[in-house]
Image: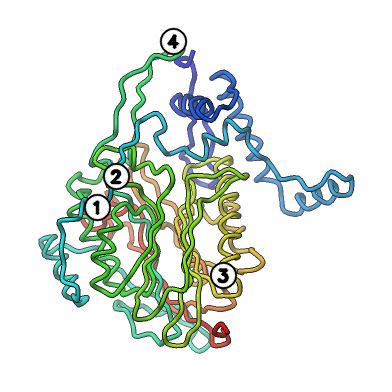
Amino acid sequence: MLSTLTPVETRSVHPGCCCPAFLTEIDILNIYLSGLREGVSMPSLLSIRDSYQVAESLARADLMTSPAARRRLQARRIELGLGEHPGFVPPKHLLLYLVRMGSFSSSPKIMNEDTQDNDMSLPEDMTKEDLLRYCSSQLQGASVLNRRFRSVPDYHDATYKHHDLPHVKDPSSIRILQWNLLSQSLTGVSGPVQLPLIFLMGAVISLGVNNDNFVCCPPEALQWQRRRNLLTQEIVRYSPDVICLQEVDHFNYLKKVLATQGYVGMFFPKPDSPCMYVKDNNGPDGCAIFFRTSRFELVKHASRVLEVWKVQSNQVALLAILRNRADGKEICIATTHLKARNGALLAALRNEQGKDLLDFVAAAAQDRPVILCGDFNAEPIEPIYTSVTTHPSIRLASAYATSEGEPPYTTWKVREEGEVRHTIDYIFYSKNKFQVEDVLEFPTGEEMGPGRVPSFNYPSDHFSLVSDLHLNHNVLSPL
C-alpha cells in the first residue's frame, strides 16, 4: 500500500550541501498519474519507487564518469560498430513526470490572466528620479538594500575598485541585469489550492500543493503591492541597457512601469506554470527580456520550450537579436530558467535542457556576440556549467567568474528545513567578443539580516546580477 512507502532520499551532487532531495509519496503518486494520463503502461507504485532509486544511482554513476573515460568508452563502442551511447536516459514513466515536477499535477488549473495591475497608472515620461521617488513614497520611505559595483582589473589597472553609482559608459559598453524575481503566486501569500483527501490503494492522501515557504519573512513583506515597488527600485536604479528576468508573473506591470524609462519587452510563459495551480494567481510565470529603445532596436526574437531526451519539458528559453543604434553592431541576448531540485537525475536533466538551450542560442546567434543569462538552478560544479562554458561555437564565460570568481551565493533564504544558500544564477558572455568592466557585488549576511531574503528590504529570494560588458572593437557590423 502507498501508506507503507518511505521517501526515497537522493543526496545532492553539490559538495557541502546537506539538503537531500526526496521522492515523497505524493511524488510517486504523481509519477503514476502522469503516466496514466500519457497512456503509458505503468508499473506498480512500489516499482515506481524502486525504478526511481535505480535511475538516480545510474544517473549519479553517469555524472561521475570522467570525460576521458567517457571518450574511451565512446571510441570503443564506435570501434565495435555499436554507435555512440547517449548516456543514461530515464524510463519513460519517470521522464514524463520529471519534466513536470514542480507543477501541481494533482490540482486543477486556475486559468487567470495578467490583470492585477490594471488599476495602476503612471505618466509616460517619468525621469528615473521621479520613478524612484514614487516607489519610495509607496513604501513609506523604505528602499532596497544598498550594493556597490566592483571594477574588474584590465591591462592598464590591475586593482579592483569599488564605486557606488553607475558610471558613464561609452557606446560599446552594455549594462546587463539578470534576476529571478520570485513569482508572486509562489511566495505563499495567496495560499495553495487544496483538494479533498482521496483514497488510493488503501492509503488516504491529501493532494495539496506547497509554495515557497519563507519562514523568517513576514507575510506583509511578501504582499505584491509592496514587492512591486521594491522590484522596480532594484531594476531602475542601475539603469541597465538590457534586462533578463525569470519567474515573471506580472509582465504587464513591468511593461507599464519600465515603459516610463524607455524600455520595451517580450515575455514567454512556461507551458505548465506552477502558478496556474495557485488560487488568486495572475497567470503563468515565465521569462522576459526588456531593452532600452534609445540604445537598441529589435531585429528579431524567438522562444523555445526546452527538450530533454526529445521530450518537451516545462522550462523555456527566450532570445532577442538587438542592433546597437550607435554603430549598427548586433548582439544576441538569451535567458532561461532551468529545472530545480537536487540529485544526480535532476542534474542530468538540467544538462540535457542546457544542451538544447545552447543549440537554440547558437543557431540564432550565428556569429553574433552572445549574452546568456538565467537561473540555471545549478552550482558551478554541475555538468550544465561545464556544457555552457565549453560550447565550441559560442565560447561563453561567466562575468562574475571572470571577476574574482563566482560569488558564494546568488540566493540565500530560510525555509522550514533550514538556511539555504546557493550560486545558481549567471551572466554568461562571448569571451572572445566582450570584456568584463564591472560587476555588482552582493550584500553580506550582516546587511541582509538573520531572515535573509526575501525581506522588507529585498523582494526576491534571488539577488540581481549586474555587469558592464565592453564589446570589442574587432566585432564587425552585419553586412
Contact flag, marks 2 and 4 (Cβ < 8 Å): no
Q: Secondary structure at mark 4?
A: loop
Instruction: Say which label, 4 or 3, has the lower sequence index.
Output: 4
* Residue 202 badge: 4
Q: Secondary structure at mark 3?
A: helix
Residue at (54, 45) in percent of width and height? 312
- Residue 36 location (% of width, % of height): 52, 25
Q: Secondary structure at mark 1?
A: loop
In terms of depth relative to the viewer, which is nearer, 371 or 310? 310
Q: Secondary structure at mark 2?
A: helix
* Residue 455 badge: 1
Instruction: Say which label, 3 or 2, has the lower sequence index.
Output: 2
Please, is residue 407 above or below residue 132 in the view?
A: above
Which residue is label 2 attached to? 185
Q: Nearer the viewer, mark 1 or mark 3?
A: 3
Q: In the image, what residue type sits under mark 2?
A: Ser
Contact flag, marks 4 and 1 (Cβ < 8 Å): no
Which residue is label 3 attached to? 365
Residue lying farthest to the top in this orientation = 202
Which quarter of the image is occupied by the C terminus?
Answer: bottom right
- The span from disc 3 to disc 2 (Cα, nearest Å) is 34 Å
- The span from disc 2 to disc 4 (Cα, nearest Å) is 33 Å
Q: Tell me where residue 385 sits by quadrant.
A: bottom right
Instruction: Say which label, 2 or 1, has the lower sequence index.
Output: 2
Color theme of the render = rainbow
In terms of depth relative to the viewer, which is nearer, 336 or 150? 336
Left or right: residue 202 versus residue 228 is: right
